[in-house]
Each structure stands twice: as structure tokens, then as C-alpha cells.
Image (cartoon, grey):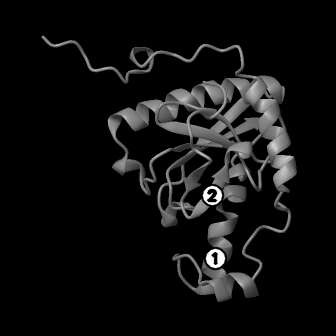
Amino acid sequence: MSAPAGKRAFFHFGPNIIPLSQTFMTSRLCYAFVNLKPVRPGHVLVATQRKVARFNDLTGAELADLFALGQRVGAAVERLFQAKGLTLTIQDGAAAGQTVSHVHLHVIPRHPGDFANNDDIYIELEKNKLIREATTGHEEPPTADVVASSHIDNDQRTPRTPEDMAAEAAILRREFEDEEPPSDSEIGLAEPPAS
């Protein structure tokens, strides 16, 4: 389905609320949405509809659906942003740089030379964790007072307005309008036949 369906008005992303205006694709168990602070133009996220903190806690069906939707989203953003490749990554747990305790796949369109050293993209993704550790002395999420008194967000990645995010989601949503979603069996969600 191209637009988020049902009576749902928003999705939960960890403690955050993602309005439908910022989502552009849903599947049976996952959804795709635009990023508040993208590392590169077109950097979007795919998350499970069920709030799951860690990768190993996903069901087999959620895992299959996350990567199937990630593949479809990746093809669309690569085409739309005229990229020559993609970085697909999951940061699993605070020690790995996960800043929102909800499994999500980063889908980042890439172009030759967009980072001097190709792996510098991981430094960009890691910056929030490093800043958190520097301001709190540990990997746990900071208290509200620490967040308010520190520049926890990377200054070079300014948060976008809800209007800008909705506009990007609308453009991405159009990429899927004529697409027929794959069947459950095509992405491995159907039960295998009994032997």
C-alpha cells in the first residue's frame, strides 16, 4: 500500500510520535518515514509498527518485512535522488549508536565522493552517541535537564520543519502510487506448506 492505511493517525517511534504526513509507505508490519535530521538528502528510515527495542527481539515475520520494505524504499530513494548506491544500516543498542530505542533501518542514498572517506558516514551516524557520552559520562540517554543544557544534536544537521518533512514524504509517497505491493509469500511471510 502506498499511503499509510487504516484508522491510525500516527506511528510510535520509540517515545516519538510520527504523524502520517511524515510517512510515505507502509507494509503489513513496518512503515517508512522521512528523517528529522538526515545525514544526506533522501536519508529515510524504515521501522517496525510494533515498538521493538532490539534487533534480536524481532519476530521472523517482522525481520522479513523490515528488509523487504527496506529494499523497496531503497530502490525508490536511489532512483528519486539519482544515487549510485545505498548505505543500509541498523544501529542495535546504545553501544552501537542507537539513539531511539526502536528497531529501524537507515536507508541513505549515496553518491561518489559524498564523504572523503566512505566510512565517514558511520561517524556522522555515531555523533549523537558520542555527544551523549561526553555530556552525561555514560551511554544511557541523558535526562531532560542535560538535553536542555547541551547541544545533543549535531549542529550541522538542523532539524527540519514538519512542513518540509511532509513535503518530502508526499514526493516519496508518489513513487509508490502505481506499485503493487508484494504478496506475503513473495517476502517470506506466508507459512510454509505442511509436509
Query: In the image, 125: left or right of 141?
Result: right
Q: Residue furthest front?
A: 7
Q: State how far apart marks 2 and 1 are (Cα).
A: 22 Å
In this rendering, is residue 28 above or below 96?
above
Residue 132 badge? 1
In this view, the mark in front (2 or 1):
2
The residue at which mark 2 appears reads as: 17
Secondary element at tag 1 = helix
Which residue is depicted at the point 12% across and 10% down? 195
| 6 and 50: which is toward the camera | 6
Residue 191 place in picture, x, y as percent: 27, 20
Q: Residues within 10 Å of mark 1 (few under 14, many from 20)?
A: many
Which residue is depicted at the point 34% across and 41% down? 59
Q: Residue furthest left?
A: 195
Amino acid marked by disc 2 = Ile
Which residue is depicted at the point 81% across and 54% down? 162
Query: In the image, 87: left or right of 164?
Result: left
Which residue is depicted at the point 51% across and 27% down? 68
Residue 147 place in picture, x, y as percent: 69, 81
Residue 5 place in picture, x, y as percent: 59, 33
Quadrant for residue 32, please give it.
Answer: top right
Mark positioned earlier in the residue sequence (2 or 1) = 2
Residue 45 place in picture, x, y as percent: 64, 44
